Amino acid sequence: MDDELLGPMADALSATLAVFILLISFFAMAQLQAISKQIKIERAGTGKYFQHEVVVDFSKPHIAEDKLVFFKSFDAYRSSDLIDRYIGQEILKQKIVAGDTVVISSNYPIINVGEGESTKRGVINALKIATVLKNKKIKYDINITNNVNFYYVGINKK
């Protein structure tokens, strides 16, 4: 083969190779673009779902499974009837008398605030119950826990 025949064949081969490389790079870029759009849509969907999942609001505190359950905190003055009913129920069920010691368990989930803020809420909620117990001449210890994803206060005889 001479140079007159090899020259045009080399040019045609390099042009064909360039076209293949361009096609492959366009295909790869299209795939990256499609994947990045899917990721953005998935992140937006997850964020929206997570937001709806976390924002849970109890209208007011209520008694459930031998605990006083509420959202973040409760007003001890407005909920005084419920608190008295809960404490009276636990005193009767556990046969607590004046002078006995109980353990106030207060939970602090770390859902949408930091650990410090959540722990502070747990202690404040326990102290709201402790004042009522003190008025009834019942001694108490406070146990702050983090074991479920909702706030509660519970009383157990020691």
Image (tube, rainbow, N blue to C red):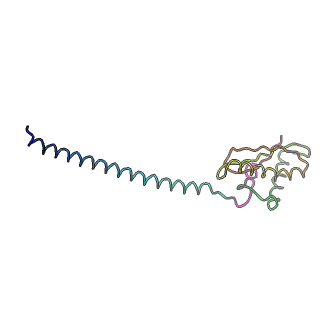
Which one is in front, 158 or 14?
14
Horizontal side of 108 relative to 139 (left or right) equals left
Which residue corresponds to the image point at 51% horizontal and 56% vertical from the top-left?
45
The magenta stretch is 58-70
Question: Residue at left 34%, top 48%?
Answer: 28
Front-most of residues 95 and 20: 20
Image location (x, y in percent) of residue 25: 31, 48
Residue at 76% across, 57% down: 74
Question: Would residue 110 appear left or right of 140 to someone viewing this image?
Answer: left
Residue found at the far top of this picture: 1
Q: Where is residue 157 in the image (x, y as percent from the top left)?
A: 83, 42
- Tell me: residue 78, above or below residue 6: below
Number of callouts: 0
Identify the residue at horizontal 75%, vertical 44% (top origin). Answer: 144
Residue 49, by quadrant, is bottom right
Quadrant where the C terminus lies? top right
Residue 144 versus residue 31: which sits nearer the camera? 31
14 with respect to 131 (left or right): left
Q: Nearer the viewer, residue 55 or 120?
A: 120
Residue 84 placement (x, y as % from top left):
84, 55
The image shows residue 130 at horizontal and vertical percentages of 84, 50
Residue 156 in magenta stretch: no
Residue at the far front in the pictured view: 3
In the picture, residue 80 is in which quadrant?
bottom right
The quadrant of the image that shows the N terminus is top left
